[in-house]
Amino acid sequence: MRYISTRGGVDPIPFDDAVMMGLAADGGLLLPEEIPAVTPDRLEELAALPYPDLAVEIMAPFIGESVPAAEFERLVRASYAAFDHPDVVPLVRHGDIRILELFHGPTLAFKDVALQFLGNLFAWILARRGESLNIIGATSGDTGSAAIHGVRGRKRINIFMLHPRGRVSPVQERQMTSVMDANVHNIAIEGTFDDGQRIVKEIFGDLAFKERFHLGAVNSINWARVLAQSVYYVSACLQVPAAERRDGIDIVVPTGNFGNIFAGFCARRLGAPIHRLILAANANNILAEFITTGCYRRGTVEETWSPSMDIQVASNFERYLYFLLNCDPAAVRRAMADFAANGELTVTPEQFRRVREDFAAGFADNDETIATIRDFHRETGYILDPHTAVGVRVGRKYRRREGGLRPLVCLATAHPAKFPDAVIRAIGSPPPVPPALQGLEDLPTRCDTLPADTDAVRSYLTALLLRERC
Ligand SMILES: *Cc1c(COP(=O)(O)O)cnc(C)c1O
């Protein structure tokens, strides 16, 4: 399998090169030349497999010759051994909705599913090539801790993680800044997540700098993340009894950067019986607006109870756009240039019709988020985290509108103990603290603060990396 850029400026490259490149050299995003199909019969055969085996089966065609089969299997197994539930991503039913719990990894958010795998994959590729890698990324909270835990203590890898100062939850911040391994560097940016993401994009756009210091990405611009995430969409479908999913299932996805839901789009294209993907946004709802109106318009970021979704410019949107524009890189380039110039992008009526086939959307404001945690807890005894609550709210609204025909799955993107303030607000007491978070507030921390300025970050990196070379 080979990989190309949404903007057409990269000669086809194998999987391992795509993983190491992160953002495509022409500023676009990398995608496989094709998405290989799994037949319905084959899918039924996979239904009985444990999660790591399912992951091997689904991902192998995308890896091609890049990693020998036995090695690949070992990497995948190691990645899910760190999860504290035997099913890795269990599907639990509560009343009218099924919750896919994606928070059983080391940092209690869905990002562990991909980033444990990516850490192992990076380490394997680097050892084989005799190279080193400096990961730089921006986080709205959960990516940072999951990425840090995916690579902490590894030889040949440094990680530099930017987070918006004071805008991630205290638990999220501690999960990052309390990691003392010498290869881990936390940077608090005086700005928003979008500032952090822009800085990282600009640094990657400086190709000379990128090559000189072997920079790599862990943000959801990295194809390996999308790929690893598409597996749990298949698993969600297969965990619903076959008799109940004849007409497919609906999956609601609490969305920020469009990475997670784009993985769902890939799973649907490769044959997972997903009827519709329902995008759930908080007050930062430009993607939900796009799906309801066909117009994608930049706004300003608002802080909410679900900070990992406080994003306005969703980098993975470009991957979807590529498919929507009939895999025409010139059209993607034009659309992205238009958006950069005008802060706005509108699709044709025909394209909009296809958007409506792929997705439904809705959003929940802060009050609705808290009310949903409260109501769901009262009805079922189950505590939702605020991101998942946005999903449940939007999913239930969708079901009321469309009728309750198909099984409805909501992805639980984080454990409620990561966001105790929202839970206390909703139900009056904090959620039980799982072992992974116990004692966190007593640990020492390490972090540097920088202005939201690309040159400042570049100078910081240069100084540190040159020192390391001596
Ligand atoms: C990252 C994150 C999201 C948003 O996921 P995207 O892939 O950016 O759309 C939602 N919820 C939680 C808890 C997250 O950590």
Image (cartoon, helix red, strand yellow):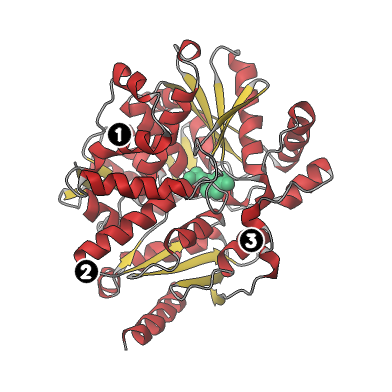
Question: Crowding near pointer 2: few (<14 within 10 Å), some, many (20+)?
Answer: few
Disc 3 residue type (three-letter): Arg
The residue that disc 1 covers is 57
403 shown above or below 320: above
Give the x, y percent position of residue 78.
39, 50
Q: CA distance from mark 3 to mark 2?
A: 38 Å
Q: Is residue 288 left or right of residue 122?
A: right
Disc 2 residue type (three-letter): Gly
Asked which secondary structure carries label 2, the reply is loop
Observer-nearest of 203 and 94: 94
Question: Crowding near pointer 1: few (<14 within 10 Å), some, many (20+)?
Answer: some
Disc 1 residue type (three-letter): Glu
Q: Earlier in the sequence, mark 2 or mark 1?
A: 1
42 shown above or below 190: above
Q: Is residue 307 left or right of residue 29?
A: right
Is the Cβ of the residue at disc 1 closer than 8 Å to that at disc 3? no
Q: Is residue 460 left or right of residue 187?
A: left
The residue that disc 3 covers is 167
* Residue 220 is at least partly visible in this image: no
In terms of image quadrants, where is residue 22?
Answer: bottom left
Residue at figure coordinates x 51%, y 27% from the top left:
251
The residue that disc 2 covers is 130
Residue at figure coordinates x 41%, y 29% from the top left:
234
Give the x, y percent position of residue 316.
40, 46
Q: Earlier in the sequence, mark 3 or mark 2?
A: 2
Which quarter of the figure is the C terminus placed in?
bottom left
Asked which secondary structure carries label 1, the reply is helix
